[in-house]
């Protein structure tokens, strides 16, 4: 069901990872991604994985939840692995009809899969341990120097916040509308691609109408609470970096250095 | 005399029809010369059916709408004075029907803080005001929840807390319970009454539920853009015939009293609660 | 014959997770053809999940749903046919309207049934009249109508499928007393004309009391009781205990009984209350004489 989607879902907690300054968390996640993509051997990749596992253990997020975050990317994983296993030249291990499976193919696809899984898990860890609003808040602050070049940083952050706030609401609404149209005999499971696309009209139109109505009402409600854009705003949650934040950042840089070092040694 | 917080003087309102195909079509007058004073500390209910103008007058009370004719004053400030818009909105807060469409943030306490952030309240003071607001609506334990995990009644109380945090003198609630189940309705009503009694906040409750209106100090009945009655609940509901003509309910006990007066068993219909009704019936039945 | 029958119907959410919850627990029901049944219970009592089983939108975890003699999940039954037999109107149905005209929107269900055009036309005109929509409104965009009118368009859209069973989930939510009475009256009229079975889910005991022949009370995923309306209101005390508000007038008559007056307590409408009082006085007059 649609309700199973977990992207952008926050898992409240009080772990060290939760408590890290979100600005640092974003930067550290960036460094982690850099580790994954600069690693060009399994050994180097393992360093990145160790970093992920340590962060994951510290965060006290249930492992099930982490697995759940992988669900939407299963097709991508399958696609990449198929592509790599069958279409990479090298030492042939065995043949399946006209397809041949090579050692290099298996190796590369394993490498790619680990990399994708680690990437998704790492970024999910960021969203699981940081409330979306703190996250957008942190992005807003990290990007605030760009205000000087007239980039509407506050407005973008506000849009993101509202989008995040309304995703669950709209998902629930889509579920409801789908059930209601099915009750009127709407057939969404059979027919050609074109017919199926057409069958979406009874869902999309009510959804759009309701989204516009919601937007209008929200705008009035925000005005009633004296919203006037980013100027002169203060924030409930103050971001204060502590020694721990710098330590975590330093640690991630050390890990990145190790990855680069291994690359040099094996390369 | 008690101090007035809101004062509407001869308010006329109609939506402009410049977007209509026929520009000369007669405009529909939504409000026709409405005059209404709300005193500080009062709990007023505005009762009327859909299209009676009750929501429109509510939207005049914090300058969401401006009158086409007449004046509205909030705490002595003319609502058409754009420079004082934020003063007006801080002294009269507004809660709407759909709780989902007025919650901005993804964490309860951050939503309650939204207005304070907009007003530039310093963070340490903000913390205190947010906590106080959440406690006053009984939602403090939920401060770190995400709104979509809450029930309709709880969400509506969060919306109320978001207004309370501004420390307004008055809250106008535009059909706050229309989308809630009975349990949610009760919890919101209880919260509203508490805010009125314990914190002295002036309440204007727009509703079409007579049982909610019955809890107010004063009921203003609107029909067709005009005020048709303005009195204490007992007096309003005892006009059973007029209420029915407008298309509004009266409490079942009042209706029964009315039916019994018609058969000559009673002479008075000024009864709106169970206890009084039981007593009156015992008198009839044991006479 | 029962038009709706459930055997040990059970539905459990999110099995195997910490969120596991039984929403409907071993429900056995027999609803006879042509009855007007009120369904009450608070949010989370399982009433919404129950009704979604009756037209096959939700598949039971265990147990059976038998509509018109057919087990709806057996292999030779097409679930879409069940949806035409059991029409379901959701809460706030006006939010599902999508067509350019009122006419086309009401036509959506009948068209999906594959009916011929003239039959569809007849049904649209008939149901539109039944729910009090004027002819000139049929060619208008549904989005131009008032809230109450939109809701009636949406209800007409399900009525036009002429289902054997019509289920409505809180059709009066958010409406003012006028709109509420209008819609409830129209539903009753539909049932009278089509001789169909109607299930009305409501939070309002007063509404249910006025129209339903029988009342199904749901509590904590189970059937609390399913009896004729007056019988249910005799149990006012038990209903209050499970957190359901009985009509004010029923509470008054219970108070009278408690204060020693020998009067019936299955009173739930004001007209009936008046009648009961007059009868009591008459009877007492006779015994005194």
Image (cartoon, rainbow, N blue to C red):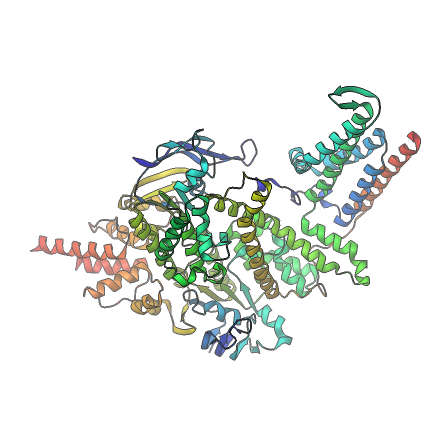
Residue B73, quarter of the rendered image: bottom right
Q: Residue at left 84%, top 29%?
A: A43
Judge by depth and name the residue closer to the eye, C10 or A238: C10
Left or right of B80: which side holds A258?
A: right
Residue B126, quarter of the rendered image: bottom right
What residue occupies the far top of the structure in this picture?
A94
Residue B195 in percent (x, y) is at 50, 62
Q: Residue at left 53%, top 32%?
A: C15
Judge by depth and name the residue closer to the eye, A222 or C95: C95
Left or right of C266: which side holds B92?
A: right
Q: Residue at left 68%, top 54%?
A: A160
Residue C288 in percent (x, y) is at 9, 55
**Viewport quadrant of the N terminus of chain A:** top right
Name above or below for residue B249 compared with residue C244. below
Number of marks in the image? Answer: 0
Name above or below for residue C18 compared with residue A142. above
Residue A151 in percent (x, y) is at 78, 60
Left or right of C224: which side holds A50?
A: right
Residue C39 in percent (x, y) is at 37, 45
Judge by depth and name the residue closer to the eye, C231 or C251: C231
**Viewport quadrant of the C terminus of chain A:** top right
Left or right of A220: which side holds A156?
A: right
Q: Is residue B139 visible?
A: no
Q: Is residue A33 visible?
A: yes
Name above or below for residue B83 compared with residue C188. below
Name above or below for residue B94 compared with residue B83. above
């Amino acid at each position: 069901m649609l309700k199973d989607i977990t992207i952008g879902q926050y898992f409240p907690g009080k772990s060290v990872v939760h408590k890290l300054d979100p600005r640092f968390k974003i930067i550290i996640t960036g460094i982690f991604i850099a580790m994954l993509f600069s690693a060009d051997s399994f050994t180097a990749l393992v360093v990145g994985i160790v970093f992920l596992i340590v962060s994951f253990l510290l965060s006290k997020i249930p492992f099930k939840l982490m697995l759940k975050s992988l669900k939407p990317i299963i097709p991508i994983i399958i696609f990449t692995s198929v592509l790599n296993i069958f279409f990479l030249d090298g030492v042939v291990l065995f043949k399946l009809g006209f397809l041949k499976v090579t050692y290099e193919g298996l190796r590369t696809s394993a490498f790619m899969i680990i990399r994708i899984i680690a990437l998704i898990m790492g970024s999910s860890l960021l969203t699981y341990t940081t409330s979306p609003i703190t996250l957008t808040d942190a992005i807003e602050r990290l990007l605030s120097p760009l205000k000087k070049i007239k980039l509407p940083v506050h407005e973008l952050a506000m849009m993101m916040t509202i989008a995040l706030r309304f995703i669950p609401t709209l998902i629930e609404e889509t579920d409801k509308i789908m059930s209601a149209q099915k009750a009127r005999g709407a057939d969404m499971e059979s027919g050609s691609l074109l017919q199926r696309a057409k069958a979406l009209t009874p869902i999309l139109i009510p959804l759009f109408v309701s989204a516009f109505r919601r937007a209008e009402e929200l705008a009035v409600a925000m005005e009633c609470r004296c919203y006037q854009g980013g100027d002169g705003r203060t924030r409930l949650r103050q971001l204060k970096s502590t020694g721990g934040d710098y330590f975590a950042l330093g640690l991630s840089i050390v890990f990145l250095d190790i990855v680069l070092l291994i690359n040099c040694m094996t390369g | 005399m008690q101090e007035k917080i809101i004062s509407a003087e001869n308010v006329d309102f109609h939506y402009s029809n410049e977007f209509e195909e026929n520009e000369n079509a007669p405009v529909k007058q939504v409000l026709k010369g409405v005059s209404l004073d709300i005193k500080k500390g009062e709990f007023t209910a505005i009762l009327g059916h859909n299209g009676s103008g009750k929501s429109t007058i509510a939207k005049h009370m914090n300058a969401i709408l401006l009158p086409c004719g007449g004046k509205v004053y909030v705490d002595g400030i003319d609502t058409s004075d754009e420079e004082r818009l934020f003063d007006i909105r801080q002294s009269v807060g507004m809660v709407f029907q759909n709780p989902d469409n007025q919650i901005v943030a993804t964490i309860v306490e951050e939503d309650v803080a939204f207005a304070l952030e907009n007003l530039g309240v310093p963070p340490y003071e903000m913390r205190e005001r947010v906590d106080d607001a959440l406690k006053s609506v009984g939602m403090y334990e939920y401060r770190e929840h995400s709104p979509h995990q809450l029930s309709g009644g709880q969400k509506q109380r969060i919306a109320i807390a978001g207004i309370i945090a501004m420390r307004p003198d008055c809250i106008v609630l535009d059909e706050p319970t229309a989308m809630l189940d009975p349990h949610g309705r009760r919890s919101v009503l209880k919260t509203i009454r508490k805010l009125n009694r314990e914190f002295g906040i002036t309440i204007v409750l727009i509703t079409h539920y007579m049982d909610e209106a019955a809890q107010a100090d004063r009921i203003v009945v609107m029909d067709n853009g005009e005020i048709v009655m303005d009195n204490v609940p007992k007096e309003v509901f005892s006009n059973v015939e007029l209420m029915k003509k407008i298309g509004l309910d009266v409490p079942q006990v009042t209706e029964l009293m009315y039916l019994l007066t018609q058969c000559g068993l009673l002479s008075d219909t000024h009864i709106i609660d169970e206890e009084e009704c039981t007593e009156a019936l015992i008198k009839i039945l044991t006479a | 014959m029962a038009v709706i029958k459930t055997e040990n119907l059970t539905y459990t959410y999110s099995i195997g997770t910490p969120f596991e919850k039984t929403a409907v627990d071993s429900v056995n029901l027999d609803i006879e053809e042509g009855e007007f049944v009120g369904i009450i219970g608070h949010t989370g009592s399982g009433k919404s999940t129950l009704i979604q089983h009756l037209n096959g939108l939700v598949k039971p975890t265990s147990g059976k749903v038998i509509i018109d003699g057919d087990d709806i999940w057996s292999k030779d039954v097409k679930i879409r046919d069940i949806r035409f037999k059991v029409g379901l109107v959701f809460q706030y149905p006006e939010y599902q309207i999508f067509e350019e005209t009122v006419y086309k929107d009401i036509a959506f269900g009948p068209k999906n049934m594959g009916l011929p055009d003239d039959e569809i036309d007849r049904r649209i005109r008939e149901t539109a009249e039944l729910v009090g929509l004027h002819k000139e409104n049929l060619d208008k965009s549904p989005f131009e109508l008032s809230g109450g009118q939109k809701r009636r368009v949406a209800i007409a859209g399900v009525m036009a499928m002429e289902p054997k069973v019509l289920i409505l989930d809180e059709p009066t939510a958010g409406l003012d007393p006028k709109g509420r009475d209008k819609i409830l009256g129209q539903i009753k009229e539909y049932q009278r004309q089509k001789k169909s079975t109607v299930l009305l889910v409501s939070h309002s005991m007063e509404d249910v009391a006025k129209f339903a022949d029988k009342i199904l009370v749901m509590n904590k995923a189970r059937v609390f009781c399913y009896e004729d309306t007056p019988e249910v209101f005799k149990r006012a005390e038990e209903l209050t205990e499970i957190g359901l508000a009985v009509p004010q007038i029923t509470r008054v008559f219970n108070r009278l009984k408690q204060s020693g007056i020998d009067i019936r307590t299955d009173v739930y409408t004001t007209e009936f209350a008046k009648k009961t009082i007059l009868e009591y006085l008459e009877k007492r007059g006779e015994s005194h004489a």
